[in-house]
Each structure stands twice: as structure tokens, then as C-alpha cells.
Image (spheres, grey):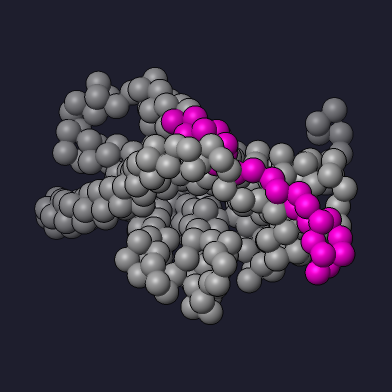
Amino acid sequence: MFGVTPVISVFGVVGNIFSIIVLIKQGMRKCSNILLVSLAFSDITFLIAFNSVPKIIYEAVWNHEYVGYSLTDTRVLFTAFNVFTILDYSFGLMGLTLPMLITIERLVVIFLPLHFHRVVTPGRTWLAVVTLGVYGLSIFVYSSFWLELNYDLDPAKNTSVGIIQRSVFFYENSNASAFLEDFLIYSSMIIPPLFTALGCLIISVKIKVTSIMRKKMTSKRSSCSRTTRTLLAVCFIYTVSSTILSLPLYIPEQVSYSLTEENPSSSGKIFYQLINTAVCINSSSNFVVYVVLNKNFRETYKRLFRNCCRAVDKPGTFV
């Protein structure tokens, strides 16, 4: 599975870059575009950090050890591992929470259309996104002190081995650590998916009722309706992925978030990789959703693609 997630992630990074370019081209005065650009940026950062070289070396190459490296090299790898883990978890948390903001924005659009531009403004949207990013970074910078590097000689292997383990700080602050872990579970894997699923259900019912009423007057589909359907698809994929991600909360004896346990079960290993794959698919699929479901996005992307092709045919275009 370590070969699957990097391939998915490469596609996801490229797709999210295209998404950002197209959405910025369409204009950042739309609050929905601000949220989607922020989601694409968080997904890019998460996918890169999730597939970082220090993590692959530690988890895949040496089976949760740094084997045969000097103390200096091991410390560099551990520091890089920590930095990428902070980015991985922080922007992963952001990606798990932004769909809830997207759902809130759509609920306001549908149920308070006359007051929408007063309630949801670009400034407030950016403030919400930045606050969410700072919140995630601050939490995981703090939790990075839960880990420490144990570097010692392994007599069985007759070489130096570096192992990442729980730090003294973690055990000295076990109550705070337990509270923070529970808080993160509820704030990222329970409340946002449930709220998003319920919000999507309400929005879907409202769209259906509105569509029936509109058919009596006109067959034209509004731009707002297209945007809402696109965002609903994004939130649906997110809800399915979040359900898979939350499996360890409900069947912990069968599923694990980590392979660092002393004796992980075979099913735990399988579900660990399934969770990784689901999270990467969730962060990589939005571009496909935009192209398939949103005509405005698709047309903008086609124009940009044609312009790029013309520029390649005429090298002097950018001079």
C-alpha cells in the first residue's frame, strides 16, 4: 500500500494545483471559492507531508526504526519527521474541518439568500480559514513534544538504531495529553462529519423541493444550484472518507491508526493502510468532482488549457 498512496497523492497534488489556478481565475470574491482554494491548499500540504521522505524511511524502509545512521543523520531525520508530522496533522485537521464551513456557507446561501452577503463576507471567510490553520498548527506544535528520539546500539543487529517513542513530557502531562486527544477526536472526526452529513441532507431536500417548484416556471438551472451540487459532492466524498477514518473509534480491537503498537493484528495493519488510502483519495478527488459537475469550472479549465497549449506552440508568448 506504500506504493498506492504516493501515486494517488501525486495525482492529488497536481489536481489541487489546477483547482487553485482555475478558482483564482474565476475570482476570489466568492466565499465558496475562498473555501475551496483553502481546501485545495490544505490538501496539497497534507499530501506532501503525508508522503515525506523521513516518514517513508522510518515506516516503510526500516519498519519503524532508523537503522545504521549516524547520530547526527538520525537527529536530522527525526527533526524533519517532526516538522512533516506537524504539517501532516495540522493541514489534515484543516481538511477535515473545512467541509463543515463549506456546509455552513451553503446553508446560509439557501436559507438566507437575501442576507447572505451581509452574513458571509470574504473577510470573515478568510478570518475563519486563518483561525482554523493557526488552531491546527498550535495544537500539533505542542503535541510534537510528545515524541523523543531514542538512539542506541542494538546488539541483535550490531548497529545503531534510532526509535521514535513517547517522551517524558507526554507522561508527565498525561492528563492534558488525554484531554487533547479526546478533544481532537470530537473536533475533527465526530462533530464535523456528523454536522456535514446532516447539513448535506437538509440542503439536498431543499434543492429537491426548490427544483420541483422551479420546473413549473423555468427549466433553467441557476449558477448557485450548480455550485451547491458541486459542494455537496465534495462533502459526500469527505463524509465517506471520514467514516472510514473514524473506524478505530468504534472497533479499536480490529482497527488502528498506527503500526507502532507492539503487536498490531493483521486486520489492524490492513485497516491502517485502508485508512491511509481513503484519506489520500479524499484529498485528491476534488479536482475530478469540479471538472465533472461544475460547468463554469470546466469551461475555465478548458480555456486555460488551450491558452497553455498556444503558449507552448509560440515560445515567445511569455517574453
Quadrant containing the C terminus in the rendered view: top right
User: Is residue 19 in view from this perspective?
Assistant: no
Q: Is residue 137 left or right of residue 206?
A: right
Image quadrant assignment for residue 7: bottom right
Residue at image coords 58%, 61%: 260
Q: Nearer the viewer, residue 311 or 11?
A: 11
Q: Position of residue 99 (x, y in %)?
A: 37, 45
Q: Position of residue 124 (x, y in %)?
A: 35, 22
Image quadrant assignment for residue 308: top right
Q: Nearer the viewer, residue 316 or 236?
A: 236
Above or below for 89 versus 241: above
Instruction: Check residue 7 for magenta coloring.
Output: no
Residue at image coords 65%, 38%: 83
Above or below for 277 versus 291: below
Residue at image coords 66%, 51%: 164
User: Is residue 85 in view from this perspective?
Assistant: yes
Q: Nearer the viewer, residue 164 or 89?
A: 164
Q: Which residues are magenta?
A: 135-162
Quadrant containing the N terminus in the rendered view: bottom right
